[in-house]
Amino acid sequence: MKTYELAARLGDSTYIFLAINGFFGVYCVIMAWRRIRQLRFRSDEAETTFITEFQDLMKAGDLEGAVKLCDYDYRALPRLCLLMLANHDQTYRQIRQLAADSLQRHIIGDLEHRLSWIATVIKSGPLLGLFGTVLGMMAAFSRIGEGDKIQPSQIAEEISIALICTALGLVTAIPLGYILSSLTIKVRSLQESLGGGLVRVLEPFRAGDA
């Protein structure tokens, strides 16, 4: 097999990797978006309502009612409340530390892990595109080096096809870059909301530890 034929075939295979990279990026975006939507409250009013109900139940000493309020609720704050209720016999400081660690490790850490995969796809897209372009250029110039009679239009066509790889890589990276920024803002907003919510739901535990 001649050099330009090998380079051309490798260049063509780059389209497959670009497609896989693009589809994987879309998958990561969908999963991250769904996870964020699952963890947060739809509105500030809904969050305030939950916190008020939880505080009232805790002040009344109704631990069973507080558990029922949080059970089967897969949003982040109710999950943290369930964790605190399961460890209500510990001191306030221990409960606060346990909730903070769980928030950072299992909620924010998980979201950051998902976002890091999107960032990897964004970085990989242009690199894969550049790799395909380089292989296409190698194929074109290797054909010239073979000494065969090649029409300039044929070489121009091969080079233009090679440049498509770079364009496809950028088409993947640019939209995902904006989406990643939007998701990052949502994660930070969720983190701030959970921080404020934790302070409020921890108040009954502090009162009980006093």
Image (cartoon, rainbow, N blue to C red):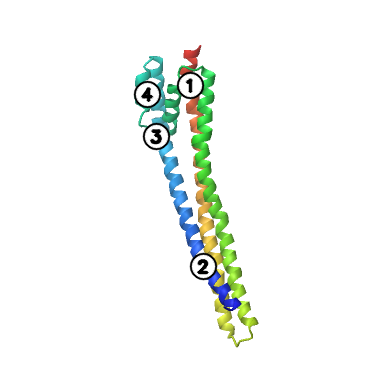
Do the residues bearing badges 4 and 1 touch, measured as CB atoms within 8 Å? no
For marks 4 and 1 on the same chain, the one whose residue lies earlier in the sequence: 4
For marks 3 and 2 on the same chain, the one whose residue lies earlier in the sequence: 2
Residue at 49%, 41% in the rendered image: 186
- Few, some or many C-alpha atoms within 10 Å of disc 3 (few <14, some 14-19, many ≥20)? few
| Disc number placed over residue 202 in the picture, else none | 1
Mark in front: 4 vs 1 = 4
- Few, some or many C-alpha atoms within 10 Å of disc 4 (few <14, some 14-19, many ≥20)? some
Q: Is 40 positioned to the left or the right of 7 in the image?
A: left
Mark in front: 3 vs 2 = 2
Residue 66 lies, in percent from the top left, at 37, 22
- Numbered disc 2: secondary structure: helix
Q: Amino acid at mark 3?
A: Tyr
Residue 47 appearing in the image = yes
| Disc number placed over residue 67 in the picture, else none | 4
Q: Is 173 positioned to the left or the right of 66 in the image?
A: right
- Numbered disc 4: secondary structure: helix
For marks 1 and 3 on the same chain, the one whose residue lies earlier in the sequence: 3
For marks 3 and 4 on the same chain, the one whose residue lies earlier in the sequence: 4
Give the spatial CA distance, label 2 vs label 4. 55 Å
Residue 10 lies, in percent from the top left, at 55, 69
For marks 2 and 4 on the same chain, the one whose residue lies earlier in the sequence: 2
Residue denoted by label 2: 13
Give the spatial CA distance, label 2 vs label 1. 56 Å
Residue at 59%, 75% in the rendered image: 139
Q: Amino acid at mark 2?
A: Ser
Placement of the N terminus among the 4 image quadrants: bottom right
Residue denoted by label 3: 74
Give the spatial CA distance, label 3 vs label 2. 42 Å
Q: Amino acid at mark 4?
A: Val
